[in-house]
Image: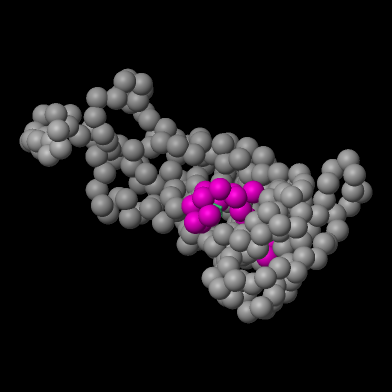
Amino acid sequence: MQELTLKVQRYLPGKDKKSYIQEFTIPLRQGMTVLDGLIYIKENMDNTLSFRSSCRMGICGSCGMLINNFPMLACHTPVEELGTDRIEVRSLPNFPIIRDLVADLDSLFEKHKSIKPYVVSSDTEEAEEPTAEFLQSGQELEGYVQFAYCVKCGLCMAACPTVATDALFLGPQPLGQAYRYCTDRRDAGVEERFHQADSRHGVWLCHLAGACSEACPKGVDPALAIQLLKRAMIFDSLRLRKKKKPASIAQPLAESRPKIAVPEFTVK
Ligand code: FES
């Protein structure tokens, strides 16, 4: 039987002064992911091993870790793609460790919250008591949809050399999302986000290393979003930014769509 050696970072606060690496040798199954390997260890060898996971399909963003020195989602990383039977797994860099492979992502969520990652509505009446949907064309959607695939896994922040040297730098995830909402015609929060991004630890600290886009498991390309955000902010400061035409409201569904007949039950 083929075997896999997993070198896992361990750290138990209150007991360990600093983290250390523990080696586990486990049976290697076909199609096994790094997360499968960690689950095998937890179920069969050491149930104190701590790591996060949920969906196991690259959607929830909770299993981000440093795998052979590169930030990756453990559930999305098949062992055979790494081309080795010795894998080192560590907690995500640029974040404090809570325990073993569990990084403290609070700073990411605080920064994300600070750029208002939602559609800020200028029509407060409609926002509070919606009567219908805001209209949006396919072309408008295409302007930001790539950036909307972010799963907030923190891999881009872990890869970013600027976050590594300035913990207060907003970073690729929040700045990428700032651009995503600024381009949305339903949104009226551009000025607030520009103000936030224009701070001492904001968008201008990015020197386009591109490591964030390389690490992103969803193809978001935060480095591109940051450059587009910079451009929009420069245009704004030169008073050349085209104001967005606010999205109009669709007709209420009940009036605009023909009624669909409900099929008869086929089973009594
Ligand atoms: Fe959800 Fe890996 S477990 S992204």
Answer left or right for 246 relative to 155.
Answer: left
Q: Is residue 111 left or right of residue 262?
A: right
How many numbered callouts?
Answer: 0
Instruction: Establish if 162 lies above or below 60.
Output: below
Does residue 139 show up magenta in the picture? no
Which residue is drawn at the image coordinates 82% and 51% (left, top)? Answer: 11
Q: The C terminus is located in which quarter?
A: top left
The quadrant holding residue 248 is top left
Look at 39% across and 52% down and name the residue there.
Answer: 144
Q: Residue at x 81, y 55 (%)?
A: 10
The answer to which of 186 and 228 lies nearer the viewer is 186
Which quadrant holds the N terminus?
bottom right
Q: Is residue 15 left or right of residue 175?
A: right
| Image position of 28 with respect to 217: above or below | below
Give how far across and how far down residue 95 sits, in percent. 72, 49
User: Residue sitting at 36 percent across and 21 percent down?
Assistant: 128
**Rendered view: 53 above or below 221:** above
- Whether residue 64 appears in magenta in the rendering, the answer is yes
Q: Nearer the viewer, residue 21 or 37?
A: 37
Relative image position of residue 231 (x, y in whole percent) = 48, 55
The location of residue 136, given as percent across then percent down, is 26, 44
Q: Which residues are magenta?
A: 52-69
Determine if residue 71 is in view. no
Q: Main secondary structure of the magenta part?
A: loop
| Residue 37 occupies quadrant | bottom right
**Depth order, front residue of 50/130:** 50
Residue 41 percent coordinates (x, y):
71, 59
Answer whether residue 79 is visible to the viewer in this image: yes
61 vs 161, nearest the viewer: 61
Specify how the rendered protein is coloured. Answer: one colour
